[in-house]
Image (cartoon, grey):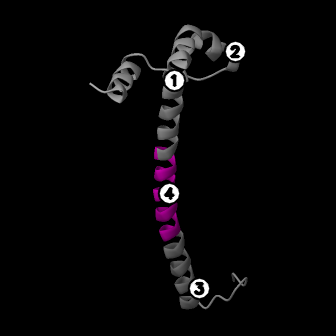
Amino acid sequence: MGISNRIQAYTTMHPFSMNRKIDQYLSEHLPDLMDEYKIADRNDVVELDAEFDGNERRISDLEGWRKEFEIKVNDSSSRLERLKMKHGLNGGDDK
């Protein structure tokens, strides 16, 4: 077994990187850091996600209602114009 293989095997078993130290530090101090820096966790975000989903559904429902309402208004406007023409009413003259 060559020296490079030994070094590779050793570094796999005993990492030299900062990642291990950072992971250890975070594991030990994460609750305090979350409180100090007001970091949200998954549980905090669940309510927010549900609220966004509800708002998206409401917006979608309102868009559907708006389209239906526009169709009804356009239909009513054209019916009104036809009635005005049929009865000889012009613009603001309602008599």
Query: Tag 3, which secondary structure?
Result: helix
Query: Tag 2, which secondary structure?
Result: helix
| Residue annotated with mark 2 | 36
In-front residue for pair 6/13: 6
Sequence order check: which comes first, mark 3 or mark 1? 1
Identify residue type, mark 3. Lys
Sequence order check: which comes first, mark 4 or mark 2? 2
Q: State the quadrant of the C terminus.
A: bottom right
| Residue annotated with mark 3 | 84
Sequence order check: which comes first, mark 1 or mark 2? 1
Query: Tag 1, which secondary structure?
Result: loop
| Label pair 1/2, CB-CB below 8 angstroms | no
Sequence order check: which comes first, mark 4 or mark 1? 1
Query: Tag 4, which secondary structure?
Result: helix
Q: Which dot, 3 or 1, sits closer to the camera?
A: 1
Q: Is residue 63 magenta?
A: yes
| Residue annotated with mark 4 | 63
Image coordinates of residue 83 in percent, x first then y, are 54, 83
Q: Residue furthest left?
A: 1
In-front residue for pair 81/13: 13
Residue 51 sits above or below residue 24 on the image = below
Q: Residues within 10 Å of mark 2 (few under 14, many from 20)?
A: few
Give the Cα distance between marks 4 and 3: 31 Å
